[in-house]
């Protein structure tokens, strides 16, 4: 049976940072159209502007978020196709009530692992995905997992140090 | 991005019917890592009216094997191929090829079927509509290929007619070397076709109502040496300047079976048939590798700015041959 947007997708529901969000599918100013990317929805509909859009083509990694625990480019996903998915953005790492931040975020501050900071949320989300899957990665594994994130300020070396510092604390090595 | 109707397909039949009904105006979306770029920059002469999401179809995301074949569903993501113990054990060259594609984020969502069907990366073809209008090149029904007299450093050095864009798929090169076939489903039924024959100089052979559903790889001989090399300017997120995949069986120092495939040198993956013929029955050595490399370039006609690709391709052929010898010898060395 053909399930068109009008029948099954009157609304789209996704979980963002632990909260369920439903969007009405349509052309209205507060609705989500089929052509909206996840990055657009996160920023323009939910106000989660921590996720950045730079190249909008999957080449820079600034828009990286976690979908069901895996790092993905949110600029290359259609919101309508994320129905039922669990999304974590950079805003989901800290606790806004207590003000605590993720050890990875703390480590980026301690190691000054950024200059302008535009690429940082994407890099942290990529690194977070790696550490979730592999809490004690080698330096080369960190490099490989961050291969999809580009920093024009050239903070890559500091980033490696920051991620490795967390990896050593959390891992067995 | 300009909007479109969106449909979640529940079955392959539904997809092929929708494709047939919309007569080329509907596009399939799997991972979307290639298609979304195509849509955002409006590079197609006709913007699709409908997108068919095939991610919800069950049964297309599997890796399984029987006695003779390894079967990979079209929706299997590249990261699943990289992490599959079965693929690592039986088709290491496919694993290496999958690992060389794009970035971790893209491999997490990009599928093997989508990798085979991705559009070319030619910078004239891909020229964004928002910067002065898209370019109507030969591939889009225009009269000329702007690359012939233009910037052609990444274009074809052989096998091109009228359009000189190269096939960007790494999976196609690896699967051609492995002798894989793919299943295409259409409204008229199902057919199988060798991955080697999937491409023409102007794209793939899929008719407008067809989609790839699975890839079948004949189990390679366990002692065959598999190699995949990809020459790129940047290590991650880059397409091949030239790539080479090979599967070579050596018995008592003599090459008994060999397939060598070059990628990004032509609009299709290219089997180095003359080099393969030459290598069969020979004891592999440095000189033999050099001669095979020359034979692999048979028929090459580089454009004004891409003769350098000949040298890279020759070097990669030499390396795949030498790599096989080194590994086999070291295996036979007494410890």
Image (cartoon, coloured by chain):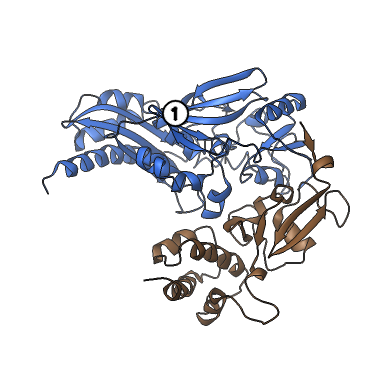
Chain colours: A brown, B blue
Q: Residue A14, image x and y in percent?
A: 73, 56
Q: How many marks?
A: 1
Q: Is residue A7 above or below residue A119?
A: above
Instruction: Please state which of residues B142 and A137 is positioned toward the viewer in this rendering.
Output: A137
Residue at 46 percent of width and 70 percent of height: A160
Q: Is residue A152 above or below residue A34?
A: below
Residue A123 is left or right of residue B40, and the answer is left
Residue at 71 percent of width and 55 percent of height: A38
Q: Residue B232, image x and y in percent?
A: 44, 48
Q: Residue furthest right?
A: A28
Res. A74 image quadrant? bottom right
Visible residue check, residue B308 = no
Instruction: Please state which of residues B8 and B155 is positioned toward the viewer in this rendering.
Output: B8
- Label 1: which secondary element: loop
Residue at 42 percent of width and 65 percent of height: A137
Q: Is residue B265 above or below residue A99?
A: above
Q: Is residue B28 above or below residue A165?
A: above
Residue B216 is left or right of residue B40, and the answer is left
Q: Residues within 10 Å of mark 1 (few under 14, many from 20)?
A: many
Q: Residue B114, image x and y in percent?
A: 58, 38
Q: Residue furthest left?
A: B334
> Which subunit holds the residue at mark 1?
B
Visible residue check, residue B259 = yes
Residue at 75 percent of width and 58 percent of height: A41
Badge 1 is on which residue? B180
Q: Residue A31, image x and y in percent?
A: 84, 54
């Amino acid at each position: 049976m053909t399930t068109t947007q009008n029948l099954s997708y009157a609304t789209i529901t996704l979980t963002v940072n632990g909260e369920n969000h439903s969007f009405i599918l349509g052309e209205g100013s507060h609705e989500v159209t089929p052509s909206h990317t996840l990055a657009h929805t996160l920023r323009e509909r939910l106000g989660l502007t921590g996720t950045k859009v730079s190249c909008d083509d999957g080449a820079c990694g600034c828009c990286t978020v976690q979908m069901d625990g895996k790092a993905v480019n949110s600029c290359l996903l259609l919101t309508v196709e994320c129905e039922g998915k669990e999304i974590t953005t950079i805003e989901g790492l800290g606790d806004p009530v207590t003000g605590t931040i993720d050890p990875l975020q703390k480590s980026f501050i301690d190691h000054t692992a950024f200059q302008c900071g535009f690429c940082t949320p994407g890099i942290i989300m990529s690194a977070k995905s790696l550490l979730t899957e592999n809490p004690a990665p080698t330096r080369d594994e960190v490099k490989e997992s961050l291969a999809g994130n580009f920093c024009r300020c050239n903070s890559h070396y500091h980033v490696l140090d920051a991620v490795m510092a967390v990896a050593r604390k959390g891992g067995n090595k | 991005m300009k909007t479109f109707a969106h449909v979640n397909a529940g079955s392959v039949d539904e997809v092929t019917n929708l494709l047939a009904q919309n007569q080329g105006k509907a596009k399939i979306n799997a991972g979307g890592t290639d298609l979304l770029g195509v849509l955002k920059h409006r590079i197609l002469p006709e913007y699709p009216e409908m997108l068919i999401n095939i991610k919800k179809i069950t049964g297309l995301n599997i890796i399984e094997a029987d006695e003779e074949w390894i079967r990979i569903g079209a929706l299997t993501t590249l990261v699943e191929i990289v992490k599959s113990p079965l693929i690592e054990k039986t088709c290491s060259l496919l694993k290496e090829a999958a690992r060389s594609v794009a970035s971790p984020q893209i491999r997490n969502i990009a599928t093997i079927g989508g990798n085979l069907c991705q559009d070319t990366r030619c910078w004239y073809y891909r020229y964004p509509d928002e910067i002065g209008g898209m370019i109507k090149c030969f591939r889009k029904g225009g009269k000329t290929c702007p690359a012939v007299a233009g910037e052609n450093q990444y274009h074809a050095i052989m096998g091109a007619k009228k359009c000189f864009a190269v096939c960007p798929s790494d999976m196609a090169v690896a699967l051609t070397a492995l002798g894989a076939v793919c299943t295409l489903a259409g409204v008229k039924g199902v057919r199988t076709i060798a991955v080697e024959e999937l491409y023409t100089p102007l794209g793939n052979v899929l008719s407008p109502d067809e989609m790839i559903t699975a890839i079948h790889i004949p189990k390679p001989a366990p002692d065959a040496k598999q190699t995949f090399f990809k020459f790129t300017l940047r290590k991650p997120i880059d397409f091949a300047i030239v790539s080479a995949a090979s599967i070579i069986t050596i018995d008592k120092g003599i090459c008994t079976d060999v397939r060598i495939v070059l990628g990004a040198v032509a609009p299709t993956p290219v089997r180095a048939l003359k080099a393969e013929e030459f290598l069969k029955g020979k004891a592999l050595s440095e000189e033999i590798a050099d001669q095979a490399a020359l034979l692999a370039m048979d028929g090459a006609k580089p454009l004004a700015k891409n003769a350098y690709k000949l040298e890279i391709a020759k070097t990669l052929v030499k390396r795949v041959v030498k790599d096989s010898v080194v590994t086999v010898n070291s295996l036979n060395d007494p410890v």
